[in-house]
Image (spheres, grey):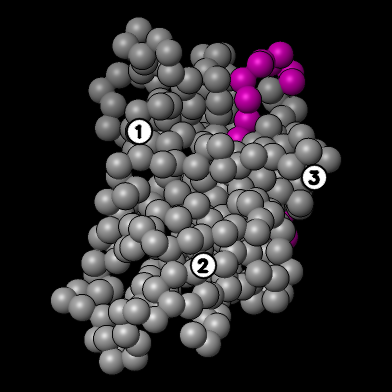
């Protein structure tokens, strides 16, 4: 059974505001090109078409965007988010006033291309670690204002979300270590007292640091910029210490190396490029002649 990714689509007032602002920055004082092209009484239909193979994400935005422009618009989705599509495949059709189709086209495609690119790249990483039991995680390296959509797109690609923000996990990185006035053990104790419901993750950049952190029994340890060989050693150290702490690899993990990190025995790999460097999925909008 296909997973219903759209059940977790991040619909809220902030999304309506984001869509409205995105339209406003494009239209400005008015869509001059459309004004000289079609009259208000002209209707038409358009097909939203995948130009390349990939995974689609963000299709519910079509309804929000086009019906927000004109409630007469009718959006028919032919696939659901998370679907793998082939070049030339129509993923949705839109019918209504032709002027609205033309005005909303670019903004709609900007959303779909960006989110589809994230989902498609994520799916490639998920395929690369298949059979290892290792999760593919995203990071907080997202376009400001787009985080909930970007992380939704990661889920559509079969990936998993790391923390959504600074509020849902305590993550003690090297800069926290440098700024702290107490020892790491004292920081962990303080974190447990102040935020008993939050998991704790500590970043380490060497095997020596790993050996110091494992006895603290935090939920996660992030192995920052470890080689695959050192990652295997880290997994062995954890086993020797009989620790239940989960290990996450991060730092310059790419499609060529992710399989090696997963096979080394970590529970997760986190990959910033899923959201900060995913190439756009080529999706177009083809108008029928009115």
Residue behind mark 1 = 166
Residue 72 image point, x, y percent:
39, 62
**As drawn, 250 above or below 93:** above
* x and y percentages locating residue 85 in the rendered image: 71, 64
Q: CA distance from mark 3 to mark 1?
A: 30 Å
Ranked by sequence position, the earlier of labels 3 and 1 is 3
Mark 2 to mark 3 CA distance (whole Å): 37 Å
Q: Which of the two residues, 36 or 135, is positioned nearer the viewer here?
A: 36
Classify mark 3: helix, strand or loop: loop
The image's mark for residue 130 is: 3
Q: Relative to residue 244, is residue 255 depicted above or below?
A: below
Q: Is residue 193 visible?
A: yes
Residue 76 magenta: no
* Residue under pointer 2: 94
Q: Main secondary structure of the magenta part?
A: loop
Q: Quadrant of the N terminus?
A: top right
Q: Nearer the viewer, mark 2 or mark 1?
A: 2
Residue 95 screen position, x and y as percent: 49, 69
The single residue placed furthest to the right in the displayed view is 131
Residue 51 appears in which quarter of the rendering?
bottom right
Q: Nearer the viewer, residue 260 or 31?
A: 31
Q: Is residue 92 left or right of residue 229?
A: left
Local packing at callout 1 (Cα closer than 10 Å; few below 14, some 14-19, many 20+) is few
The magenta region covers 239-257
Q: Earlier in the sequence, mark 2 or mark 1?
A: 2
Residue 84, quarter of picture: bottom right
Give the Cα distance between marks 2 and 1.
Answer: 39 Å
Q: Nearer the viewer, residue 148 or 260?
A: 148
């Amino acid at each position: 059974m296909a997973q219903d990714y759209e059940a977790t689509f991040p619909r809220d007032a902030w999304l309506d505001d984001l869509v409205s602002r995105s339209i406003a920055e494009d239209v400005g004082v008015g869509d001059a090109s459309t004004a000289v092209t079609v009259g208000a009484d002209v209707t038409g239909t358009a097909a939203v078409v995948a130009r390349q193979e990939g995974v689609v994400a963000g299709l519910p935005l079509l309804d929000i965007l086009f019906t927000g422009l004109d409630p007469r618009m009718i959006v028919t989705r032919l696939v659901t988010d998370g679907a793998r599509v082939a070049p030339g495949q129509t993923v949705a059709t839109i019918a209504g006033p032709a002027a609205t189709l033309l005005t909303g086209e670019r903004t709609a495609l900007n959303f779909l291309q960006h989110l589809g690119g994230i989902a498609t790249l994520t799916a490639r990483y998920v395929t690369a670690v298949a059979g290892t039991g290792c999760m593919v995680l995203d990071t907080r390296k997202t376009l400001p204002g787009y985080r909930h959509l970007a992380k939704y797109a990661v889920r559509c690609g079969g990936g998993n979300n790391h923390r959504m923000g600074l509020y849902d996990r305590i993550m003690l990185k090297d800069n926290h270590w440098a700024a702290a006035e107490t020892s790491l053990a004292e920081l962990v104790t303080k974190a447990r007292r102040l935020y008993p419901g939050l998991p704790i993750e500590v970043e380490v950049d060497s095997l020596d640091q790993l050996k110091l952190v494992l006895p603290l029994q935090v939920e996660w340890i992030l192995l920052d910029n470890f080689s695959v060989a050192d990652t295997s050693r880290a997994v062995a150290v954890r086993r020797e210490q009989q620790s239940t702490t989960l290990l996450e690899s991060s730092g310059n993990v790419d499609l060529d190396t992710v399989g090696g990190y997963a096979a080394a025995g970590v529970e997760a790999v986190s990959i910033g490029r899923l959201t900060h460097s995913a190439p756009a999925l080529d999706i177009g909008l083809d108008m029928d002649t009115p």
